[in-house]
Every structure is written in C-alpha cells, then in structure tokens.
Image: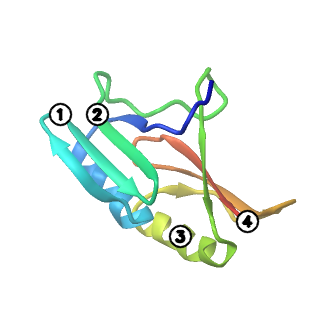
Amino acid sequence: MQIRRGETNLYVSDLERSAAFYEAALGFEVAESGEGYRKLSQGSLVLTLFPSLNPGPAPTPGMVPHMSCDLVVDDAAIEAIAERLETAGAEVTPLKSWAQGRHLMFRDPDGIGWELLSR
C-alpha cells in the first residue's frame, strides 16, 4: 500500500478572510471556488477551506488533541516569508535555528497553527 499526500482541509470562520490571508502570506492561488468552500493551491500543496460550524478560535497548540502541519521552504526565503506572515496578520514566533536549518511557528487569523521550516 502506498499513501500519497492529499489535500489539507481547514475549517475557518470566514472563507474570504482566510483565502486572502493564505494568498497574501504564502502565495496560494484560488484553484476552485464553490458554495461553501475555497480550494487554494501553491505548488503541489492544496488547502481546501470550509466554513466552521463553531467559528471560535482554534485551541492553543498542545492544549487539546489536534494535529499540526509543517511547511518547508528554502532557507534563503524564510525571513521574507516571516515578514509576509506578520504583514498578513499571523501570530509569528521568533525565527530559531535547529539541526537542519531554521524554523518558526505561526497561527493564521483563526488560530490554526503551522510550523515553517527551512532546509
């Protein structure tokens, strides 16, 4: 059996705001849009945004069972991406070094947490 990467689904409080955030901060483009969803793509990564039934903020990472996702970029781009994230309204931790490169954590406007890694 082989498992391949599929789409990442995000449940957000405001489709338009979230789509605009991912477009401005990370260069995603709207690939498909329909009633009640937006499909965004950036390279081989696809995010599908759906409206949340309970539009409160996402829990703080590590406080309740959940998952997080890593996004990997070239090291030369990570500082510019960190600036774009902050400009787009993300909560961004300071950039830190790790064994393979540098990383930071960020949360989108709904509090959904991500890790940005450089290699």
The location of residue 5, given as percent across then percent down, is 53, 39
Q: Residues within 10 Å of mark 1 (few under 14, many from 20)?
A: few
Q: Residues within 10 Å of mark 2 (few under 14, many from 20)?
A: some
Identified by mark 3, the residue type is Ile
Alpha-carbon distance for marks 1 and 4? 36 Å
Question: Which residue is the extreme one toward the left?
Answer: 35
Alpha-carbon distance for marks 1 and 2? 6 Å
Identified by mark 2, the residue type is Phe
Q: Which residue is mark 1?
A: 36
Alpha-carbon distance for marks 3 and 2? 25 Å
Q: Quadrant of residue 73?
A: bottom right
Secondary structure beneath dot 1 equals loop
Alpha-carbon distance for marks 1 and 3? 29 Å
Alpha-carbon distance for marks 4 and 2? 31 Å
Q: Are marks 1 and 4 in contact (CB under 8 Å)?
A: no
Q: Measuring 69% from the left and 73% from the top, which residue is drawn there?
A: 75
Identified by mark 4, the residue type is Arg
Q: Measuring 18% from the left and 45% from the top, which residue is drawn there?
A: 33
Q: Which residue is mark 3?
A: 81
The tag earlier along the polypeptide, 4 or 2, is 2
Q: Are marks 1 and 2 in contact (CB under 8 Å)?
A: yes
Q: Which residue is mark 4?
A: 119
